[in-house]
Amino acid sequence: NYWKFYDGETKQLLKYDIYGQKKKGEETFSNWAKNKPEYANLFSDYEKIYADWRPYAMHRQYIIEGIMGCRLIQAAGSWQKLESFLKKNDTTSGYFTKALDSADKARKAYHLNYNLKADENILAAVLMMFYNDIDPGQHPKDFYETLLKHYSNIEENPFKAFAADVFGNSMMNDDTKWQAFKLHPTLNALMNDPAYKVVAAFIKNYNDNIVPRYNEFTAKNNDLGNLYLKGLFEMSPDKMNKIYPDANFTMRVSYGNVKSYKPRDAVTYDYVCTMTGVVQKYKPGDYEFDLPQKFIDLYKAKDFGRYADPLYNDVVVCFITTNDITGGNSGSPVLDGKGELIGLAFDGNYEALSHKIAFDKDLNRTICVDIRYVLWCIEKLGGAKPIVDELKIVE
């Protein structure tokens, strides 16, 4: 899902030449700002802060997407609070107990749904990529030297051998070791855990050497962004006064219509999809498209109750609208003209994933789950009709 979002967004940005549009806008601004000291150096200042940050940008991405993309290392990251307490020899306070409970919950969550071998392969791959792609001057001190020296005589990939040792010997994957640590937590046991050694090496190096630079870059970037926006309002007050206000941390209401769309030649997407489509995608045992047997039985019996749409003789699962949404809108209520709840927004369509940067009125659609399907799941599938009985249902 994450990959698909950026793939779709990139394609739309290229399709509409957003880079060219932004560049043209900046050139217009620069010409306007030539004789205005407050704005004359705006873009050269932008160039400088990006030039200063660029050598470290990949490092940050590799930590967030790579090192912490390994679920074992991500879970072991919850042990950092334990380290701070153990360094102070504080193992009796309630705060330490809470930190230990939190670490225990993170460990249990890690074991609920994961592929051990896949996670091990991820760790081996990202460690090798970091080693090859990141400036050696930014590597955690002595980490790679120790790794390569210790596994130098192993025929297979040294990073795979290291990852195998981490997964085979960490108390994250050993119940006996973890229970022993919980009974007698020591700094030595924590710092010598193979998984936590990775956390300690990479996260400490990142926090000490990359985070300060990133914070400085972000602060300067925000200041320049505010200045640029101020200048745009001065340059084109009539145009800028028509844009959306900044509604961060406040409620925002957008207006739209239920509407189909045509993404390309000879292709039309209807404005609804139904339960029949859910069943058509059904794949037993598949983690994305599996369905409970009760769902199949109810569908075969056409037990839709009062939630069937008379036009389709089926339960409408989703519908699409022309509303404008952004990240964080999932779950937002979709109301009709009478103020009645008809659905919940939860996604955007693939062909308009660039909407937060470039909105396309012809292709942009918000995907909403139909409230009738929600109610059907509660009453019929979940057997929780008393919850539905407490609601005012408009038919």
Image: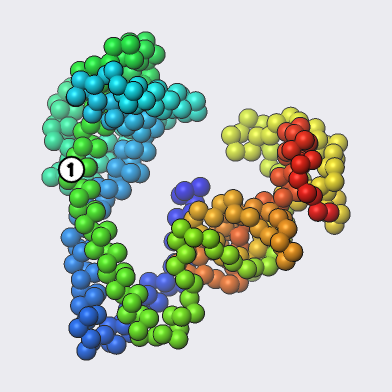
Residue 298: give x, y in percent of width and height.
81, 35
Instruction: Classify residue 108 by image quadrant.
Output: top left
Evaluate whether residue 295 shows in this view: no
Horizontal side of 329 relative to 281 (left or right) equals left
| Residue, disc 1 | 208
Residue at figure coordinates x 25%, y 60% from the top left: 219
Residue 160: give x, y in percent of width and height.
30, 28
Instruction: Please tell me which residue lies in front, 378 or 359.
Output: 378
Residue at figure coordinates x 29%, y 73% from the top left: 227
Residue at figure coordinates x 27%, y 19% from the top left: 91
Q: Tell me if residue 52 comes above or below residue 362 in the rendering.
A: above
Instruction: Please tell me which residue lies in front, 279 or 87.
Output: 87
Residue 204: give x, y in percent of width and height.
21, 37
Q: Amino acid at mark 1?
A: Asp
Pick the quarter of the image with the C terminus. Answer: bottom right
Horizontal side of 236 relative to 67 (left or right) equals right
Instruction: Classify residue 18 by image quadrant.
Output: bottom left
Residue at figure coordinates x 24%, y 25% from the top left: 85
Instruction: Please tell me which residue lies in front, 188 or 120.
Output: 188
Horizontal side of 299 relative to 178 (left or right) equals right
Element under disc 1: helix
Residue 47: give x, y in percent of width and height.
22, 69
